[in-house]
Image (cartoon, grey):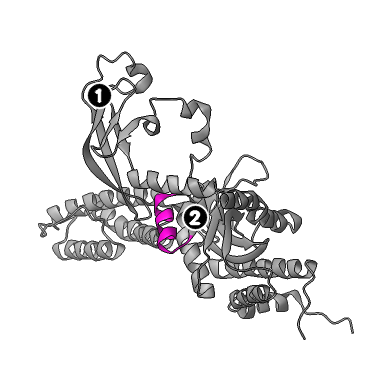
Amino acid sequence: GMQRPDFNTINYFRKYRLADVIDDIFTQVVQMLVDAKFVSLEVQYIDGTKIEANANKYTFVWKKATKTNQDKLDLKVKSILREAERVLNMELKDESDNIMTAEEMQKRTDDILTQMDEKGISDKKLRKAVAKVKEESVPKMKEYEEKLEIVGDRGSYSKTDKDATFMRMKEDAMNNGQTKPGYNVQIATENQFITNYDLYWRPTDQGTLIPFLDSFKDRYGRQSSTVCADSGYGSEMNYEYMLSNQIDPYVKYNMFHAEDKRNRKNNPFLVENMFYNQEQNFYVCPRGQHLDFVWEVKETSDLGYESTKSVYRAKDCSRCPLRGMCYKGKADRRTIEVNHRNNELRAMAKELLTSEEGLKHRSKRPIEPEAVFGQIKYDNNFKRFHYIGRRLVKAEFATIAVAHNIRKMISNGYVMPL
C-alpha cells in the first residue's frame, strides 16, 4: 500500500535498538565469512583514516589553553582572598602550588564575606573584589574543571560532540589539511573484508595498535598469527607487544625506506654506519676515535612505555679536521644516544619485510585496507559521521562495515545456506 516508515522511526531504531547490537551483528557476519572460507582471521592488514565528526569546527576547547587560564585565575583569586584575610586578621591559608577547586574557592569566599559582615569592614573596594570572586570567578573555575574532566588525556574536544578530538584532516575541501573534530578509525582487513574496527581519539596510529589488537582478541577469542601495517605503527613498544603475543610483525618503521638510500648508506658519520664493538661496548668514529659508553638513560613515552638508551661519548673532538662533517654542536666532543633494543627489533622487522613472505604482504597491504577506505569514503561518499557521541558514531561505522562485507560477499558469489 505504498506505506513506508517515517525517517524518525528509522532514526529511533538506529539510535535505541541497533546501536547496542550492531557490533555483535558485525562479528556474526565475519563468522559467516570464516565459515564460507572468505577469510581465515590468521592475518590482519591494518590501517587507519580520520573521518570528520558531526560537530562545529569552531566550537573547540583546547586543554593547554584551558589549563593556562585556570592557572591565571587561581593566582588572581588567591591574591585577592589573601589580602582580604590579612585585613580581617583571619588565619592565613597554607596555600600550596595546587590549584584551588571551585568548591574550596566558594567556601573560602563565603567565610571572608561572613567575617566582613560581622566585623563591619567598610573597605568597599575590597568587598567588591571578594564579591566578584564569588559571582564570577567561582563559576569560571567550575567551568574550567568541567572542561578538563571532559578532555581527559586528550588535547582538545568539540563542544558539539564532546567525544570528538581535533585532528588534521587530509581530505579537507580546501586541500590544506585543516584541523577539524573527528575520529581516528582503525580497521583490519583480509581479502578486502573488514574483520575488525574501532575508533580512537589519538590522531597518530602508533598508539592505537595495541588496544586495536586487544579488541580483535576480545571479539574472536583468538589472535592472528600475522599483522601487516605501514610505518605509522612501527615502534619498540608495538614490536615487543606483537612478539610477546606470538604475532609475526610485518610492520615497517619510519626509516625503513630512507636507510637504504645512497646518501644515508654512504655517510660514515651516521651512528648506524659506525663500527660497534659489542664485546667492549664502544663505537669507532671515521677518524678512529672511540666513543666510550658513559651511562644509560631511561625514557618514558606519553603512552607510558619505558625504553633504555645508551649514551656514548668521544674523548676529544676539538682538533679533529672532520668535526664539521661529523656533528654541528658546540661541545668539544661528540655524544650519541643508541637504543640497542629498538635497533634489534628493527633489524628483525627488516628481515621479515624483505623475506619472500614479507614482500607478498607488502604488495597486498596497499590493496587491502587502503582500498576498503577508498570504497567507503569515495565510492559510497561516506566522509563525515551523521551521529554525535562515540557510542552512536561507532555504531554508525559498524553499520557501514556490515554493509561493506555483505556487498563483498554477494559480489563474490556467496549463497545463503538453506
Residue 36 lies, in percent from the top left, at: 70, 74
Instruction: State left or right for residue 395 relative to residue 142.
Output: right
Q: Which residue is mark 1?
A: 333
Q: Nearer the viewer, residue 211 or 118?
A: 211
Image quadrant where one finds the C terminus = bottom right
Q: Is 242 a magenta residue? A: yes
Residue 235 lies, in percent from the top left, at: 43, 49
Residue type beneath disc 1 = Arg
Name the chief secondary structure element in magenta: helix
Residue at the (71%, 76%) spot, across then down: 10
**Crowd tier of the residue under label 1, counting other residues whose Cα lies within 10 Å: few below 14, some 14–19, many 20 or above:** some
What are the residue bounds of the magenta stretch?
235-247
Q: Which residue is mark 2?
A: 249
Q: Is 332 a magenta residue? A: no
The image shows residue 202, relative to residue 406, as above or below, that is above
Residue at the (21%, 54%) spot, across then down: 81
**Residue 204 at least partly seen:** no
The image shows residue 293, relative to residue 227, as above or below, that is above
Q: Nearer the viewer, residue 194 or 340?
A: 340
Q: Secondary structure at mark 1?
A: loop
Residue type beneath disc 2 = Pro
**Residue 163 at least partly seen:** yes
